Image (cartoon, rainbow, N blue to C red):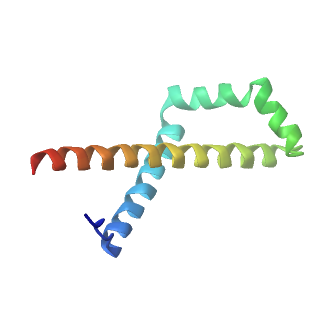
Amino acid sequence: MAAKEVTVLSTLGRTACLVGLTIVFMVFVRFCPPISHAVQWVAGTAPWQRLYDLFHVNGALGREQLMLSAIVIFCFALALSVQLAGLWLWRRLFSKAQ
């Protein structure tokens, strides 16, 4: 059986969903105190301090940029995982219904 072709509309929808989920997770990092405290704790660990040395980050601005980059990458990866799990569940539910 041939694979169903992906439409432009479904691609745009998935992209919008992925961007939206990423933004939602970033908002949680910013405004949810337990998550923001966890981020601050991670930023104070020895391995994270070694990242500053690895990337030759000396100033406060560089440290903030590195932390922001890590938050964005982590939130994107989490959003992608949630989206893929949701698509898998969607396909599984609707394949059993047919």
Determine whether, in the image, residue 21 is placed left or right of residue 62: left
Q: Nearer the viewer, residue 91 or 58?
A: 91
Q: Quadrant of residue 17?
A: bottom left
Q: Nearer the viewer, residue 49 or 12?
A: 12
Residue 63: give x, y in percent of width and height.
Answer: 78, 43
**How many numbered dots are placed on residues in this image?**
0
Residue at the far bottom in the pictured view: 8
Residue 43: give x, y in percent of width and height.
Answer: 71, 31
**Residue drawn where x is 80% and y is 48% of the image:** 62
Give the quadrant of the N terminus: bottom left
**Residue drawn where x is 40% and y is 43% of the image:** 82
Residue 95: give x, y in percent of width and height.
Answer: 18, 49
Residue at the far left in the pictured view: 98
Residue 41: give x, y in percent of width and height.
Answer: 66, 25
Q: Quadrant of residue 3?
A: bottom left
Determine whether, in the image, residue 28 is placed left or right of residue 61: left
Give the answer, above or below, for where 6 lies relative to 90.
below
**Residue drawn where x is 66% and y is 47% of the image:** 68
